[in-house]
Amino acid sequence: MKFDFTRWLPAIAKDSYQKTALSVVGVAVLGGLAFGPAAVAAPVTIGPHDAAIAAIDFATSDNGGSDKHDATDGSGLTMGSRDAKRGGGQPSREQLVPFGVQGAQSRIPLDGAQRDNAKAIIKAAKKTGVGERGAVIGVATSLQESKLYNLGNLGTSNDHDSEGLFQQRPSSGWGTPEQITDPEYAATAFFTALKNVDGWQNLPLTQAAQTVQVSAYPFAYAQWEDQAADIVQQLW
């Protein structure tokens, strides 16, 4: 099914800079990609995965930035502590893609708005302690869900209530529309939910992402791992 994006592109941009970016490249990017497999998260009748339900409450509470759930890297340091100790150098490919990529990879050019949103995701990854690998999962998830655009309400062109970088849904408890279209809030909520997935560090990227997102197309996240790793390596 094809959608007429041009009539509502200005309405879904969350700021004036993004309106300009979407008006120039949004039709090409969104029209060809954003409404492909898993562009909106889960069907209306499906809520978050069991492993993420408690995390949604945690992510949207005052304790959402707590360090008590920080993952460790095997050395006894949390990922966030390790990163701080290292001094914030560029992460290695082994840290970013420890298990190699799965399947054919997709890649899109990024404009300034997309890069800024990627930076917001990486910043939240550092803050929540999921480290470089978590950042790759987050960026890849947003590439699949919104192509790294902070999408607002799509109105009648979208029969779900998904919004923002991760296409999170107010009806599933992720937050208000205003909250989930705040990149920092949305990314923090995603990573907090991810940290509540047992052994997420050792899962394939697409499985880790799907456990949080509960997409109708669970394998679609894998195609963005290579570009997500490049983005994180460049912007870390």
Image (cartoon, rainbow, N blue to C red):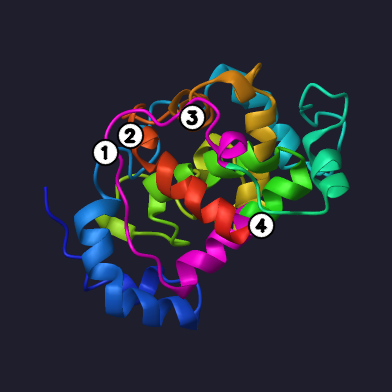
Question: Which of the two discs, 2 and 1, sits closer to the camera?
Answer: 2
Q: Earlier in the sequence, mark 3 or mark 2?
A: 3
Asked if disc 3 and disc 1 are in contact, CB closer than 8 Å, the reply is no
Asked if disc 2 and disc 1 are in contact, CB closer than 8 Å, the reply is yes
Question: Which of the two discs, 4 and 2, sits closer to the camera?
Answer: 2
Question: Which of the two discs, 3 and 2, sits closer to the camera?
Answer: 3
> Pointer 3: residues within 10 angstroms few (<14), some, or many (20+)?
many
Question: What secondary structure is marked by label 2?
Answer: helix
- Picture residue at 49% right of the left edge, 51% below the top: 230
Amino acid tagged 1 = Pro
Q: Name the residue under label 4.
A: 184
Question: What secondary structure is marked by label 4?
Answer: helix
Left of 125 or right of it: where is 83?
right
Separation of residues labelled 2 and 1 (CA atoms):
7 Å
Residue 129 vertical placement versus 234 (above, below):
above
Residue 197 in the image: state x and y as whole percent. 63, 21
> Pointer 2: residues within 10 angstroms few (<14), some, or many (20+)?
many
Q: Mark 3 points at which residue?
A: 205
Q: Where are the magenta residues, as a range?
A: 93-121
Residue 214 vertical placement versus 16 (above, below):
above
Report the disc number at residue 220: 2
Q: Which of marks 3 and 4 is nearer the N terminus?
A: 4
> Pointer 1: residues within 10 angstroms few (<14), some, or many (20+)?
some
Asked if disc 1 and disc 4 are in contact, CB closer than 8 Å, the reply is no
Residue located farthest toward the left when viewing the structure as drawn: 1
**Residue 120 part of the magenta segment:** yes
Amino acid tagged 2 = Ala
Q: State the quadrant of the C terminus.
A: bottom right
Residue 198 appears in the figure: yes
Left of 131 or right of it: where is 12?
left
Question: What secondary structure is marked by label 1?
Answer: loop
